[in-house]
Image: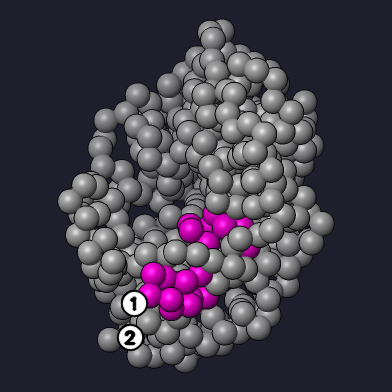
Amino acid sequence: MSDLDLFARHKAVLPDWLALYYADPLEITHGEGRYVWDAAGKKYLDFFGGILTTMTAHALPEVTKAVSEQAGRIIHSSTLYLNRPMVELAERIAQLSGIPDARVFFTTSGTEANDTALLLATAYRQSNQILAMRNSYHGRSFSAVGITGNKGWSPTSLSPLQTLYVHGGLRTRGPYTELSDAEFIAACVADLEDLLGHVRAPAALIAEPIQGVGGFTAPPDGLYAAFREVLQERGILWIADEVQTGWGRTGDHFWGWQAHGASGPPDMLTFAKGIGNGMSIGGVVARAEVMNCLDSNSISTFGGSPVTMAAGNANLTYLLEHDLQGNARRVGGMLIERLRAIAAQHPGVREIRGRGLMIGVELVKPGTDEADPDAAAAVLEVAREEGLLIGKGGGHNTSVLRIAPPLSLTVAEAEEGAAILERALRSAP
């Protein structure tokens, strides 16, 4: 059966708003390492990893073996019973989180993790006010959509929460662009203090250390540490959304919050995506006082599934034993410099930004600062034809190419992908 036949069936039974990449959508049938194959047998270098989710490698033997062995014993039990793989993974994540006296609750997605963090914060603080960053994205649930600061991903203004948006997550656009990093941080802190002078008592600030859907944008290091000082004075919690930045992807740090750690760790961090290497794992790490604040019953039917926990444990072991954080720093740094050299020859590239293997290429109409989503879509198509899969995003009309390969990417593969992207930038209409 052709992709076109499958596309017709897809459209007949699935929602219109369920986005697909490419004019001729792609069916991926299998993968190995950093490569995937489509239904026609064409091979692609994967620079997006199922939206930053295939973190180590496709078909990683250690993970597939752990999943198979656990599935042969028992697939499901729920959190109503003791679950050894869940306890083991929770112990490791609590230790790695940097949060003192940490407790871990597992979910099935980053959306659900953020939803849980919002529930905990509002219950703990007895407030329905949430501070969120402009250009942010935190998931697809009703509450997560309600705090998302990116209109392209927020289909309704209705929300159970009152959301107040803070400036600072987007360094190279907005009113403070021309300031130095230190001046930028000072201006954003002053803006936050002014905002807090006009409202009652927000429950928490939720922030992505690097904004994912927003186009891999980030503030200067230390911004959230400066925010943390202001928040702590008022008892306001800090939630670090690490769904895309966790597990060493940024290279320099294991968690994105560590670039802003001068005032201590967050009260909560949320995680998902890469830890399962494709299996559905999300979760929240929180100080015990915050995690244990709920006064009603709560369980999870699928969170902490024995099979997904087995995958997470095997994947985390591989990540740590093979120093994939260090590989992300080394290979990612090389790839960023290679892309900056390419961008210097292309007038439509506004900026190459990112950290480790989390890289954004922002496109504009040459000679202007105007976003060029048509160019981004065209480059995506040409790259696919050349055998490279990348993503796109950005709060300014989806004009940012998003590059986030598995963290085991080799230098040769990084060069292969950069060469294809260079050709795509030159040849895209």
- Disc number for residue 267: none
Magenta-colored stretch includes residue 45: yes
Q: Which residue is mark 2?
A: 428
Q: Nearer the viewer, residue 199 or 316?
A: 316
Name of the residue lying farthest toward the right: 321
Magenta-colored stretch includes residue 244: no
Residue at image point 28% right, 51% down: 18
Describe the element under mark 2 as helix, strand or loop: loop
Mark 1 or mark 2: name the one nearer the start of the chain. Answer: 1
| Marks 1 and 2, how far apart at CA | 8 Å
Name of the residue lying farthest toward the front: 72
Can you say whether 184 is above or below 201 in the image? below
> How far across and how far down the image is residue 16, in percent?
20, 50
> How far across and how far down the image is residue 273, in percent?
55, 48
Residue at image point 53% right, 8% down: 296
Q: Nearer the viewer, residue 35 or 102?
A: 35
Q: Which residue is mark 1?
A: 381
Horizontally, is 390 left or right of 378 in the view? Answer: right
Name the residue type under label 1: Glu
Residue at image point 48% right, 76% down: 44
Q: Disc 1 or disc 2, which is closer to the eye?
A: 1
Name the residue type under label 2: Ala
Q: Which residues are magenta?
A: 36-57
